[in-house]
Image (cartoon, rainbow, N blue to C red):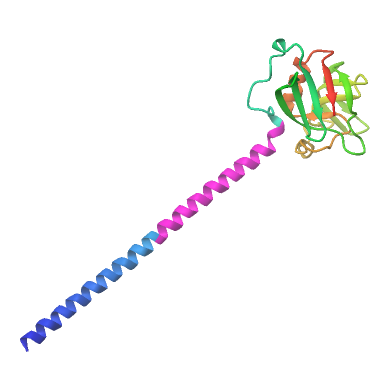
Amino acid sequence: MKNKKIIATVIALVGIVMIVIAAFAVNSNNTQKVEAEQRAAKVAKKAKAKQVAKKKKSLNAWKKPSEAKSYPDLNKHKTAYLEVSIPKQRVYVKDGKDTLYTMKAATGEKKSPTPKGNFEIQNRGDSFYNEESKEGANYWTSFKDWGVYLFHSVPTDADGKYVESEAHKLGTPSSHGCVRLTIPDAKWINSSVPDGMKVVVK
């Protein structure tokens, strides 16, 4: 009888221990699951923040230089010239075969293409507004027909404000024949590229 009680007690104790172990295991699994979910949520939040930052950076690209490095010192590159690539929608500052700087651009649409050929830098000015096209721009520098075909900033409206919907088209043919550039890129060409510099459009 006494042995039966001892065995029953031992069985009861083993049962309690098993229940405690099972409860601990369940609790541990739940904790791990919660921690895993929290880690996943943090990763997703960081990824979303990066995506938002990347999109914002892309939308503001027209306000900044095309490259993170300094513009070339043309005093050290006496034979430098500008090459406009219509297929790539880029303007390259080149010296021989070396590309010194690459600018994102927007050349003419199909109905108003940018003329191809060899030209040179002519006259320039701070800003203009074309009543017929209802568009203007800043930092214009002519390369053909003395003020007809230009390098210039992304477009401005009649009040001189930048038209963001047009600014976001850099990288695609979208102009009336001129070569649109980011504001700093257009400003650099306007202030640093000398009259007579060769311009190749191809």
Vertical side of 138 occupied by 41: above or below: below
Vertical side of 17 occupied by 40: above or below: above
The residue lying at 62 percent from left, 41 percent from top is: 54
| Residue 160 seen | no
Residue 7 location (% of width, % of height): 12, 82
The residue lying at 48 percent from left, 54 percent from top is: 40
Task: Please state if 101 lies on the left or on the right of 131 as rendered.
Answer: left
Which residue occupies the foreground of this view, 154 or 144?
A: 144
The residue lying at 68 percent from left, 27 percent from top is: 65
Task: Please state if 190 lies on the left or on the right of 52 as rendered.
Answer: right
Say which quarter of the image contains residue 49. top right
Residue 136 location (% of width, % of height): 85, 29
Give the quarter of the figure containing the N terminus: bottom left
Seen as rendered, the residue at the extreme bottom is 1
Say which quarter of the image contains residue 150. top right
Which residue occupies the foreground of this view, 64 or 94?
A: 94
Give the quarter of the figure containing the C terminus: top right
Say which quarter of the image contains residue 194. top right
The residue lying at 88 percent from left, 20 percent from top is: 119
Residue 53 magenta-highlighted: yes
Vertical side of 24 occupied by 169: above or below: above
The stretch in magenta equals 33-62
Residue 188 magenta-highlighted: no
The majority secondary structure of the magenta stretch comes to helix
| Residue 13 seen | yes
Task: Please state if 137 lies on the left or on the right of 45 as rendered.
Answer: right
